[in-house]
Amino acid sequence: MNDPQDLIISDKWIVSKRGDKNPVDPRRPYAWFVEKERTTTGEIEDTAIIFLTNRECAYHCLMCDLWKNTTDFTIPVGAIPDQIEWALERIGNAKHLKLYNSGSFFDGSAIPEEDYTRIASLVSYFETVIVESHPKLIGDICLRFRDLLKPELQVALGLETVNPDVLLRLNKKMTLQDFAHSVSFLNSHEIPSRAFILLRPPFLSEEEGILWAERSLDFAFRVGAECCTVIPVREGNGAMEHLSDQGHFSRPDIRSLESVLEYGIGLNSGRVFADLWDLNLFSGCSKCFDRRKNRMKEMNLNQRIIDTVNCDCNM
């Protein structure tokens, strides 16, 4: 294995490893669905998620593949509300809404501030609206959007990892202090925040991946995040395949995700969810996969640890 310090990870290097983008329509979201989620009140309720089509994120994080469904240009004023309106006509009666845009909601090159008023009108019947943002873009713009909303605003932030060396190499262009400052700003204005935490980003072994995900949960709750979602890292953007070929990255095991979820719930510091998207990628055992998935799904919803799955693959 090559020394990872020999790698110079930059925007240019990350972009050079990419394949093609998917075709997208700036007047339509590229995906939407409804899932159940445990809310801050302890209720299990429907949450609609709309994946908005907009300009590619200005930050080129090493592990990110969300650029695949973005445009190379700033979309016209009115396009984002059109997308939201189109999706809401098809979603049904969810109580909560996530507006995810493959980057930062508060990036004006992605979502024009001129659209905030119409967006707020469209989502007025929800109880909560959750958007995502890079921590460095948190500021007064969040308050201007919040003040237009009838629902409660919540903001999801990518913490990724508290391992300082790995965080630097993820090309996130932020520090742990940046994250803590953003959460503090949001809390001071009564805007709850949630943190995205990576399970086994590049340059970590399986055991290190578990340890640093747990330390990241500790940090996120300590600085004031209300909720954390643990995301197992995968290939899919070119750069990750290159790191895998060089021996600097391997997918985490599904059992590691179970372990970190158990740890997080056991903290009793806030809601902790395991991201179950494409979960089969992280399982090498067909005999217990469904049981493990169902176990984590139940723990996500009920926020309590249930009996472990027994299987030969545990031996």
Image (cartoon, rainbow, N blue to C red):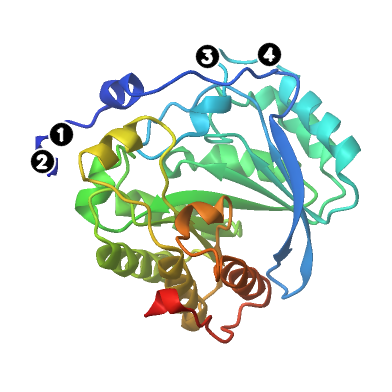
Does residue 221 appear to the left or right of 88 in the view shown? left
Q: Within 10 Å of the Cα at label 2, are there few (<14), some (14-19), or many (20+) other Cα atoms?
A: few
Is 110 placed left or right of 2 in the picture?
right
Residue contact between numbered discs 3 and 4, judged by CB atoms under 8 Å: no
Say what amino acid the circle numbered 4 marks. Answer: Pro
Residue 147 or 118: which is nearer the viewer?
118
Q: In this view, does 206 lie above or below 218?
A: above
x, y percentage for residue 2? 10, 41
Q: How crowded is mark 1: few (under 14 residues within 10 Å), some or many (20 or more)?
A: few
Ranked by sequence position, the earlier of labels 1 and 2 is 2
Q: Name the residue under label 2.
A: 2
Q: Residues within 10 Å of mark 3 (few under 14, many from 20)?
A: few
Q: Write down the quadrant of residue 284 in the picture.
A: bottom left
Residue topped by disc 3: 72
Residue at position x 27%, y 68% in the image: 207
Q: Distance between the residues labelled 2 and 3?
A: 34 Å
In the rendered image, residue 79, in percent from the top left (x then y), is placed at 74, 20
Specify whether residue 186 is in view. no
Question: Which secondary structure, mark 4?
Answer: loop
The residue carrying mark 1 is 7
Question: Which marked residue is nearer to the observer: mark 2 or mark 3?
Answer: 2
